[in-house]
Amino acid sequence: MSSDSNQAASHPALEHVQRILAVSSCKGGVGKSTTAVNVALALARYGLRIGLLDADVYGPSLPTLIRPEDPTLYQNGEGMILPLEVQGLKVMSFGWVDPSQQRGAAILRGPMVSQVVSQLATRVDWGELDYLVIDFPPGTGDIQLTLTQQLPIDAALIVTTPQQLSFVDVVKGIQMFDTVRVPTVAVLENMSYFLCPDNGKKYKVFGEGAKQQLVDRFGIEHSFELPIDPRLSQSGDEGTPLVASDPEDEISQLYFNIAEAVHGEINRLTQEDPGIPKLSYNVGQNCELLYPDGKLVEIAPFDLRMSCRCAHCVSESTGEQLIPAEDVDPDIYPTEIKQVGRYAASVKWSDGNCASIYPYSYLEERFVQSK
Ligand code: ADP
């Protein structure tokens, strides 16, 4: 959760990005992109430096929601794409890279999608940012999970609508982020009610939402409701998000509340979270697991190799060790160590036999607590 964690990420383009916030939803059409752009603008109006990446390569909507004067993309001397700048945000969308996408011509398959998004995030010269807000592709499947593994995401904001089944959707979203140790800091129930202009009454068109259940089951204190309001769809169609065109509007104020809660919660978690450790190896020595508080745990490369839990090394059904210790070179050593999201390190080994992924929680259990 700390800025250090991102600086440890192996993506030079994200080196000066302090935090990454994913805006996610289980389904399309719930108002995720509208939320991402308005929350990004609200954060920027608090004086924070904000980037916004539209990661929905199947249906990029940022080029409709916000319109830079000149959407031509340029690259810097190092071949990095320069983000477009509009309304004080640095923005990027696949829709500007390949404008044919706006005509619905996308035929990318799943694994390609996460690769393209990851490249978009890491090949853009974001410069110094307090937040990179990522408008996630809708859903909680492989694409989304891969993205959370490829990019060091710090927190998630989940957008939903109050239909009957949507609580299940939110739970799926929270659980997906949970598996990769990304905390869900807020939930927005969009199109939650209709405020009748004639009598000022609130009508819960889709029934009651699940606010209290979120607090009770997951301790998510920050859940918000936003009304159905034609001004939101109209401002979206016109390319001037409400927070930019009318920051004083009461709906804009709700986006400011969300931005404030998200920022506050992330700050709180940053203070609580000791940050993620870093696994490294110096030739001829032990592997080192270094925690941000300075705690250092040495692990012999052979012991680390023997702790691999991949399907090649351990039976998924019985948990039985499939590789006998005598079959492993006692002088084995890591040839590459990479950070995986915020929750693990991946290691390639000198015998080339397997690529291990070690969740930090597993390393902690195995090598730290026993010390
Ligand atoms: P998603 O990113 O989840 O697919 P969008 O943000 O593109 O959804 O929103 C879908 C449509 O609903 C857009 O036309 C948008 O302007 C509209 N919309 C979003 N939120 C609201 C709202 N609270 N009231 C009215 N229209 C909304």
Image (tube, rainbow, N blue to C red):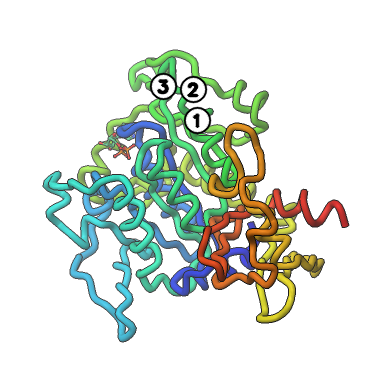
Crowd class of label 3 (few under 14; some 14 to 19; many from 20; radius 10 Å): many
Q: Quadrant of residue 315?
A: top right
Residue under numbered circle 2: 168
**Separation of residues labelled 3 and 2 (CA atoms):** 20 Å
Q: Position of residue 187 (x, y in %)?
A: 52, 35
Q: Which mark is residue 172?
A: 1
Q: Amino acid at mark 2?
A: Val
Taking 244 as reference, is 310 left or right?
right
Quadrant of picture, ligand 1? top left
Instruction: Name the image quarter holding the N terminus.
Output: bottom right
Q: Position of residue 231 (x, y in %)?
A: 29, 36
345 or 239, which lies in front? 345
**Separation of residues labelled 3 and 1 (CA atoms):** 23 Å
Q: Position of residue 81 (x, y in %)?
A: 30, 73
Residue plotted at (79% across, 65% down): 297
Asked if the residue under mark 2 is in contact with the one under mark 1, i.e. CB atoms within 8 Å, the reply is yes
User: Viewer-nearest of labels 3 and 1?
Assistant: 1
Residue plotted at (51% across, 72% down): 15
Residue furthest to the front in view is 326
Taking 304 as reference, is 9 left or right?
left
